[in-house]
């Protein structure tokens, strides 16, 4: 439970993501694992979609920037995550057994 946050935070770095620009209000691809979505403003800057909700900050947006993992990335990312969690588990168990031994 404690490691869920850091693993989720590191997930985009575990495998290369796909970045693409699309017309405004384009839906995320159905066979993708969404990571980030931002509105592209006329000056080229990007504003996070969570900032746009309920405000008029994104009224002049010209497009959408999408960042996602392809569906083919699912298994490799899960294997890397499982390896990290297994290594952390072994580390904690080793520390516990060394502590109990004393």
Image (tube, grey):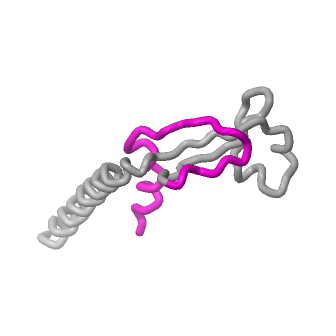
Q: Is residue 64 left or right of residue 11?
A: right
Where is residue 73 shown, x and y percent of the image?
37, 48
Front residue of this view, candidates 83 and 34: 34
Q: Which residues are magenta?
A: 1-30
In the rendered image, the quadrant that contains the C terminus is bottom left
Q: Nearer the viewer, residue 24 or 13?
A: 24
Q: Is residue 51 left or right of residue 8?
A: right
Report how many numbered discs are placed on residues in the image: 0
Residue at figure coordinates x 31%, y 49% from the top left: 76
Residue 15 on the magenta span: yes
Please name the residue shown 38% across and 42% down the image. Answer: 15
Q: Provide residue 34's location: percent of width, then percent of height.
A: 53, 51
Foreground: 16 or 100?
16
Residue 93 sits in quarter: bottom left
**Would residue 25 be found to the left or right of residue 60 on screen?**
left
For the point 35% across and 51% down, which residue is it?
A: 77
Pinpoint residue 87: horizontal percent, then vertical percent.
Answer: 24, 56
Residue lying furthest bottom in this view? 100
21 or 5, nearer to the observer:
21
Residue drawn at (85%, 44%), measured in percent from left and top? 59
Check the picture and name the quadrant holding the N terminus.
bottom left
Tell me if residue 74 comes above or below residue 64 in the rendering. Answer: below
């Amino acid at each position: 439970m404690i490691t869920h946050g850091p693993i989720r935070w590191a997930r985009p770095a575990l495998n290369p993501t796909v970045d693409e620009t699309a017309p405004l209000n384009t839906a995320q691809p159905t066979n993708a694992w969404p990571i980030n979505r931002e509105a592209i403003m006329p000056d080229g800057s990007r504003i996070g979609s969570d900032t746009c909700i309920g405000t008029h900050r994104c009224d002049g947006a010209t497009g959408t920037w999408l960042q996602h993992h392809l569906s083919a990335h699912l298994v490799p990312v899960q294997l890397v995550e499982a390896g990290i969690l297994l290594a952390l588990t072994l580390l904690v168990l080793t520390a516990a057994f060394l502590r109990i031994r004393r």
